[in-house]
Amino acid sequence: MECCRRATPGTPLLLLAFLLLSSRTTRSEEDRDTLWDAWGSWSECSRTCGGGASYSLRRCLGSKSCEGRNIRYRTCSNVDCPPEAGDFRAQQCSAHNDVKHHGQFYEWLPVSNDPDNPCSLKCQAKGTALIVELAPKVLDGTRCYTESLDMCISGLCQMVGCDHQLGSNAKEDNCGVCSGDGSTCRLVRGQYKSQLSAPKLDDTVVAIPYGSRHVLLILRGPDHLYLETKTLQGAKGENSLSSTGTFLVGNSSADFQKSLDKETLKMAGPLTADFIVKIRNSEPINSTVQFIFYQPIIHRWRETDFFPCSATCGGGYQLTSAECYDLRSNRVVADQYCNYYPENIKPKPKLQECNLDPCPASDGYKQIMPYDLYHPLPRWEATPWTACSSSCGGGIQSRTVSCVEEDIQGHMTSVEEWKCMYRPKTPIVQPCNIFDCPKWLAQEWSPCTVTCGQGLRYRVVLCIDHRGMHTGGCSPKTKPHIKEECIIPTPCYKPKEKLPVEARGPWYKQAQELEEGASVSEEPSFIPEAWSACTVTCGVGTQVRIVKCQVLLSFSQSVADLPVDECEGPKPASQRACYAGPCNGEVPELNQGETDGLLGGLQDFDELYDWEYEGFTKCSESCGGGVQEAVVSCLNKQTREPADENLCVTSRRPPKLLKACSLDPCPSRWEIGKWSPCSLTCGVGLQTRDVFCSQIRSREMNETVILADDLCRQHKPSTVQACNRFDCPPAWYPAQWQPCSRTCGGGVQKREVLCKQRMADGSFLELPETFCSTSKLASQQACKRDDCPSEWLLSDWSECSTSCGEGTQTRSAICRKVLKTGVSAVVNSSLCPPLPFSSSIRPCMLAACARPGRPSTKHNPHITAARKIYIQTPRQRKLHFVVGGFAYLLPKTAVVLRCPTRRFRKPLITWEKDGQHLISSAHVTVAPFGFLKIHRLKPSDAGVYTCSAGPAREQFVIKLIGGNQKLVARPMSLRSEEEALPVRKANPKEVLQTHKHQNGIFSNGSKAEKRGLAADPGSHYDDLVSRLLEQGGWPGELLASWEVQDSTERNISSEEEQNTEQALMHLPFTIVTEQQRLDDILRNLSQQPEELRDVYSKHLVAQLAQEIFRSHIEHPDTLLKPSEQRIPPVAIPPRKPVSSFTSLVRTSAGEAGGGSRRPHRKPTILRKISAAQQLSASEVVTHLGQTVALASGTLSVLLHCEAIGNPRPTISWARNGEEVQFSDRILLQPDDSLQILAPVEADVGFYTCNATNALGYDSVSIAVTLAGKPLVKTSRMTVINTKEPAITVDIGSTVKTVQGVNVTINCQVAGVPEAEVTWFKNKSKLGSSHHLHEGSLLLTDVSSSDQGLYFCRAANVHGELTENTQLLILDPPQVPTQLEDIRALLSATGPNLPSVLMSPLGTQLVLDPGKSALLGCPIKGHPTPNITWFHGGRSVATITRLTHHILAAGQILQVANLNGESQGEFSCLAQNEAGVLVQKASLIIQDYWWSVDRLATCSASCGNRGIQQPRLRCLLNSTEVSPSHCAGKVRPAVHPVPCNRRDCPSRWMVTSWSACTRSCGGGIQTRRVTCQKLKASGISTPVSNDMCTQLAKRPVDTQACNQQLCVEWAFSSWGQCNGPCIGPRLAVQHRQVFCQTLDGVALPSEQCSALPRPVSTQNCWSEACSVHWRVSLWTLCTATCGNYGFQSRRVECVHARTNKAVPEHLCSWGPRPANWQRCNITPCENSMFQSQRTFCKSPTGRRVQRAVPGPKPEHRALDLGPQGL
């Protein structure tokens, strides 16, 4: 504790008093009584986030020490820090990074959770084991422990609760609520088990809603978990949980652990999204998922505000209510949502007084008393309870409870129930008469009434209630009988007696009296009282008794007398004869009449008539258990005939006998409920009811079961019916609101409101509006009443700034905003988005201005056009053109079209195609400087392109050249294509005639031709270009230089390039000619006669070709050509006719041997395009590329082959792909020509000339046929392709390729005339839809559907020939997408064996030693791949120590007896012609062992208790697993290692606080504070306080405690006892209870809430309720011994003050004393009977001695002797 400073001696006393007085003016009431000054202001928080500490100081104003502390703390900045802020303790450690420790710099990391001194700053040097205490205490606000809110303040750890208050022990409950009781969430736990029969691959385990906490899921099995999330905003996500780690799923942290057959998912929560946990099935083994989490209760009760006051003045009250609130949607919902959760307890309404001011009408002197004293609060008022539904065995009684309000005059008024809800509503139903019903109790049987033969015996049967008292109320039907026959084995003396003589002893009298006595029940019945005494003391007299008609009142348990006619049945006799014994001890002599009068009823009736059972009545129920009652009849014993029941003694009537019957369950039947209220009040509504099938099993057990509907055979009654089928009155029916007319700024939305009438059939009848009497609903309303965002309002463009040339146009812009009222307002331009510059100014272009001094002759823009025609023959990537011409181009060529202009700005140039404006796209780019670029031409790009520069316009026509040397027509209809197809197959003359009719170029009849124009300007030169493309007379040397490419290059080229290159002229340059030249040709042709026009056209086209070729040689730079080609000089002959083209030969330079000066080039075979020359009838000379037809007279065939190249190529010959074997008939001439002498049929075939040098080779074929028969060039090789995108083969080959490849099958045919080629697939003809081109078949992107046998048939007039090629589609080995087959195969092979599927990335299976395993290699491919198994890189067939079996055609490898040598990587190699696939799996033999790891952190930083415990882990293949796996392994011995055994620095040691000196009102508690030093030996020694003061501030040793006021409950005296008279202490009296201080100052009740509150209401006993039970003395016992004696007494309810009897129900609050009990139950002695020997005559005449009971005459049977018989 810090003491206050004393005043210096020089301080004036007056100044000190002034300071003391002035300081106390700002102090609290508590501080004013002490010497402490007021607390100062709070300091700044030690942290800006994450929870810090702030302190406040005060000073001591006295001359002595003040009691208490001069500093106090509080928490502050209790907001979470941003993630980048880092740990607060780590920041303090890192502050020492630039301070040397022992001469060296370290990077310090925090050491947290120190158990000895958590508030010291201990840090560990990074990368070392060095731990140093860098500061004795951390900064205030640092957490003591990482997982706790406790914080260090002034070096001491202070407790902090979840409410962020110091010293608080508040904790969060499982729902995350601070100091909560767990009622805001509910625990959800369960288990999911996967179903093998489910065909789907995944299934939902559980849905975990938003806000859940403490989520834990554990999966056991081979399947895998994955998560799907959905946020409240609707964003969805998914996480497959593929590996162990901590993930952020939907902004919620999830910790996932994955092992071999177990997956664990933990999420602390609260979850920020809805999570759906799913399971993905992977193997046919069941998996189980156990889950547990705390789910928030999203629907909670929320207390409302107080209702309006019940009175405006004079005192009223107001209540609160409760509403169900949805926490997720933040809205109020129906109450049933909150009632769904049992944890939700609806808050009780609160009540408070209000408007206590007196009303203006009062006199102003009325005392304002507490509201409930002069105006009682509304209260529950109940009616009396109804009668109990059952007199015993448990019943129910009810009453009505309503909320009433009493005014000042005492009048009661019923009000709404909510006004009474401040108190619980009194019950309206309660159980009653829960005691057991009375039941019969039978005593033991009496001795037989006779001493010989057949007699009777009796017993007492009593009706005993639940208190053991003899009472009424037992059912007569179930009463046991009190009499039965008995047989004494001693024979009687009188043989004539047919019936036994009944000796009516005392038992009969007792039993009869008891039977006829008390039998009062709830049904009116005759109740006889006891017989009076006999009227005589001897002889024969009479007895009388009173018989009343009485009933038992169950409510009051009292007996009421009724008129006699209220009771049914015969009335018992009220008089009978009695015999009192002989007078004067003599036996009277009675005559026969008197005897009959006395004993006739006891003898004759007994002998002649008696009761007997005769069958049973019909069963009361047909099923489910009924009752049958035995029929009792009065019979004549002698005749066995029924007699009147009055002839039988009523008392002898046997009891009712019941038996169960019809015990079988009832058949099922429909149970029908009540109809519900009608859904509509008019029109046609619906009513529903419950109908269900039920079956009564047992009525006795009240067992009824509900069955399925199909078990009830009867037709099911209807569950719905129409109701209220009458027309409704007309009413307004509104439609849905239409969309708002504006999106902002105040709009209007409308709806249609019609007057309709709902008819009885459910339809609606539309009526005039006058039919609806009520006011019409609104049909229009305002909407979108909010301001629009600011926007620019632009004016029209101004006039051009100049009158000629180039100028500008401008327009103004204002920023406006449409308000919610619909009015537009101009606002600051800064509120509008930035306006682009181009939106307010743009260029404009007018006619060019005239130059000074010159007439203005050319003002308009001009486009510099080039009137040329371009024909592309070589394939080039990009070509540049200028508008004004025509271009015939190859597909896939990029075109750049330029529009050069003068006197016009290029950015203003526009482009059109076929009259449509062009804009930039991915295929066409319109550049801003007059360029147009088309990327990779396609047929749709053909057309007329127009460039516009103001009024100037120029066109450029683009046409495409197809693969058949024909122009690609514009898109046409299907019919047009069919019409064009025969044209392609016709001969050149037919083609020309077709062009004549189609284009009209050479006909005179065309009107367009007469005008000198074509009908279509885009097709003006099409016929000339087509003839030029068909021209065959180009110089061979030039062509050869362009066509030099080997066969490899041709195979690699794409299919389209092949077809195009084979079809075109193979020119090395793009043909360029002037349009004027072609116009002259067309003009000349139009002037020729029609019959000569065809000849002239050929001549003019040939002449044009020669001019183009000569122009290219003389001016190579003026033509478009590929930049990469270099054409050698070629000698050009003078202009000659077309035939002279074929006579060109190689230049003299080539023959002169000047090769040393020529550049190196690969071989090229010169193709001479000419017909075979027949020098004579027997000799044929031809060049390559032609067809030779052998005739019968042919003696010699000479095949020429000329090739150029440097070095000079070597010539070789082959026939049908095989090298030609030279002989004396087949000769190789010196010029490399091949001569065949005397050709025969075996010489027929394709002959190929091969030219080869060091740079490459070239080959050309020529066909030799027999008599012109068709010939097909074939190949018998097999081509296997797995890599190339396109392949080309000759017919006859076998092709094996993978999918997706372009396959070209060449069918080169020969014959005279030329053979026609037809293609078939599997004997089906291929149509035009297939890619057929000059005998070749192109199959693009082949798939399995293209597999088959393809036939090429060559036919002409001399015959036909067919060859075929087989196409096989290879499917390389790959992993199938569906693995069910291989899994089923594994399961069938080894149902109980562990298995694993191989995969390209590798899988893993962990096994125990000695086990077997199955490895599956899932594979598919065509042909079926061959599978080879390897282990460790070696084939399993070569490993002798590996026990294995290869099953299922190699797909499964079974490895048995696994050991250390068996583990490792296994692989399966699947291979076929298409490729190879390797899949891997690793078998790991698990072996658990204990591992001793490095030492743990020292348990103490100093002293003698520091130890380091070696860490013991259970490992499986270097991975830590549960220690239970190592249970059977030898556990290594580990011993703790001492550490940090050194002296500790001095530190303050404190004891616990003592008990507070006062329990309230402010006390003091103390503790002892010492400075001690802990030695390495463990001994703590006190040291000087100065040693600790240097390190830390001394803790306080005194503190205030129990500062709360001393309070108590006080109460007034009890009020008057008032209430109903229903028993002792059941009235109520009240008193006032209030909270006050010990000085009597009243306080709010909350101040005394910690004390037990005395009761303010208690039960009392009013004077009217002073009643009790009064009993009389017991009567004499009816027997002196035995078990048959009983005695009774009188019990009545009397008033305690008046001692008068009152109704018994007033005493029902207490147990009723017994009025009957058994007595003298001791056994009787033998002396009770004296043995008197009397003799009877037996039937044989012998005298028989018998014992007669005696000695009392009243116990002996009456014996009249023979005279009386």
Image (cartoon, rainbow, N blue to C red):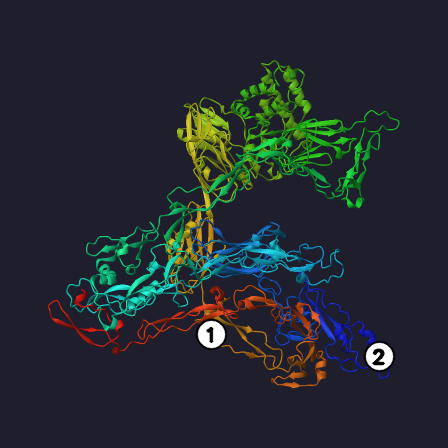
Considering only vertical position in the picture, is 337 above or below 808?
below
Identity, as a three-letter code, of the amino acid under mark 1? Arg
Considering only vertical position in the picture, is 1676 above or below 499?
below
Q: Could you tell me which quadrant the C terminus lies in? A: bottom left
Look at mark 1 in the image and give the residue it sits on: 1531
**Dot 1, how many residues are within 10 Å of its Cα: few (below 14), some (14-19), or many (20+)?**
some
Look at mark 2 in the image and give the residue it sits on: 16
Q: Between marks 2 and 1, how big is the CA–CA gap?
A: 78 Å
Considering only vertical position in the picture, is 1656 above or below 1063?
below
Query: Where in the figure is residue 691, as x and y percent of width and height?
Result: 44, 46
- Point out the frontmost of discs 2 and 1: 2
Give me the residue at 47% from left, 22% from top. Answer: 1176
Query: Where in the figure is residue 224, as x and y percent of width and height?
Result: 49, 56
Q: Is residue 172 left or right of residue 565?
A: right
The foreground one among 563 and 584 is 584
**Dot 2, how many residues are within 10 Å of its Cα: few (below 14), some (14-19), or many (20+)?**
some
Q: Is residue 1339 visible?
A: yes
Identity, as a three-letter code, of the amino acid under mark 2? Leu
Q: Please, what secondary structure does the residue beneath circle 2 have?
A: helix
User: Hey, which quadrant is residue 924 in on the image?
Assistant: top right
**Lower position in the chain sequence, tag 2 or tag 1:** 2
Q: Is residue 324 visible?
A: no
Considering only vertical position in the picture, is 1339 above or below 1644?
above
The foreground one among 609 and 1420 is 609
Q: Is residue 266 left or right of residue 522?
A: right
The foreground one among 107 and 415 is 415
Query: Where in the figure is residue 1165, as x and y percent of width and height?
Result: 54, 34
Instruction: Check if mark 2's residue and mark 1's residue have beta carbons within 8 Å.
Output: no
The foreground one among 592 and 1290 is 592
